[in-house]
Image (spheres, grey):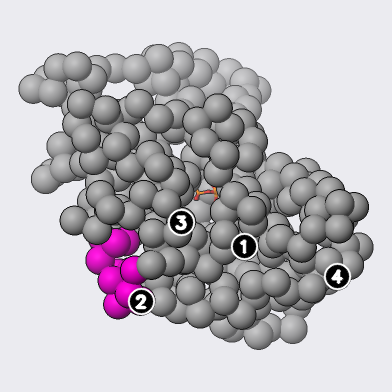
Amino acid sequence: MLLTQTTTPEDVKALNRAELPQLCSEIRHAILESSAAVGGHVAPNLGVVELTVALHRVFNSPTDKIVFDVSHQTYAHKALTGRAYTYIDPERYGEASGFANPDESEHDLFAMGHTSTSISLGCGLAHARDLAGDTYNVITVIGDGSLSGGLAFEGFNNAAELDSNLIIIVNDNDQSIAENHGGLYRNLAELRASNGTCERNVFRAMGLDYRYLDAGNDVLALVDALQELRDVDRPIVLHVSTAKGKGFEPAQSDPEHWHHVGPFDMATGRKLCPGHPSEPAPRTYADITGEALSAAIERDPQVVGITAATPYIMGF
Ligand SMILES: Cc1ncc(C[n+]2csc(CCOP(=O)(O)OP(=O)(O)O)c2C)c(N)n1
């Protein structure tokens, strides 16, 4: 097994290029097996396995700074930075936090869980680097769903004035937790459909350089694209198209309900009762909240439910 011997970013660099797809497949399998046992952010993590392997192949974390927005998609990153045990050893499943955690590793720069913060954090890191006269790369990874949060726009706005390296990777799987909403997403769709070449381009309009890569789940294509951006002397967006839930049919065909799940049966995708795998999943607070709110809305059409773009977590 490659994954047991590939515990650091240096190990990822020591592999043959031809071994990278196998490493990805082992990481994907480990994420699925461990999540089936203890639950997890299945669909987001399956979609960025190749991107994460490519990042650690090309960049030198923790000297180069990699910031994952929300950080719910950091399982492969954790596996490649000394924490594979939490995905491959059944005795230690669930031991690492589900989010980035600086107490766990020097490769996790911030404790977070809110969307839309990574670009501003990246700007801060880039300014700090420039003030200190350092030259490392700063890379931020943000999902399309998290782009609509206001702080992301603040980050783009500030990034455009940076006169130095900042690589903003937009991980576009055409899905937030639920479906995306808003004008921004029309432009992302146009960009995907035109292979990044359409005239209207929100990122260029904000003053940033821009590249597009359609093959966002092809580890070798990602390595090549990132290699070209390494040590770039300006802020640049790399827009990559990925598949949420990649490699696990139930998650790929229903990414909303596989954004985060409790334990499940890997063969069928059936959700299981935590601690009692032979029983079906119990009704949750979300189910009860959703039922109560739906009944209230039916009684009175003026009742409105507001969520943080998380309708199913509210039981809808
Ligand atoms: C401020 C804030 N609002 C809402 C949420 C709930 N939330 C978590 S991840 C997410 C977006 C997920 O979509 P995306 O960024 O595209 O990542 P993906 O899971 O698709 O990879 C949302 C809305 C949050 N964590 N923080």
The image quadrant that residue 89 belongs to is top left
The boundaries of the magenta stretch are 15-25
Mark 3 and mark 4 lie on one chain; the one further toward the N terminus is: 3
Q: Which of 95 and 266 is in front in this view?
A: 95
Tag shown at residue 17 = 2
Report helix, strand or loop for mark 3. helix
Q: Report the amino acid beneath label 2.
A: Arg
Mark 2 and mark 3 lie on one chain; the one further toward the N terminus is: 3
Q: Give me the C-alpha separation between circle 2 and circle 3.
A: 14 Å
Q: Do the residues labelled 4 and 1 touch (CB within 8 Å)?
A: no
Mark 1 and mark 3 lie on one chain; the one further toward the N terminus is: 3
Main structural element of the magenta stretch: helix, strand or loop? helix
Q: Report the amino acid beneath label 4.
A: Gly
Q: Report the amino acid beneath label 1.
A: Ile
Screen quadrant of the N terminus:
bottom left
Check the image and report above or below for 289 versus 189.
Answer: above
Quadrant position of ligand 1: top right
**Residue that mark 1 sits on:** 169
Mark 2 and mark 4 lie on one chain; the one further toward the N terminus is: 2
Report helix, strand or loop for mark 4. loop
Residue in the picture at 35% in, 26% down: 95
Q: Nearer the viewer, residue 291 or 145?
A: 145
**Residue that mark 3 sits on:** 9
* x and y percentages locating residue 22 in the rendered image: 25, 66
Q: Report the amino acid beneath label 3.
A: Pro
Mark 2 and mark 1 lie on one chain; the one further toward the N terminus is: 2
Q: Can residue 76 be seen in this view?
A: no
Residue in the picture at 86% in, 52% down: 132
**Residue that mark 4 sits on:** 207
* x and y percentages locating residue 265 in the rendered image: 15, 37
Under 8 Å from ligand 1: the CB of mark 3?
A: no
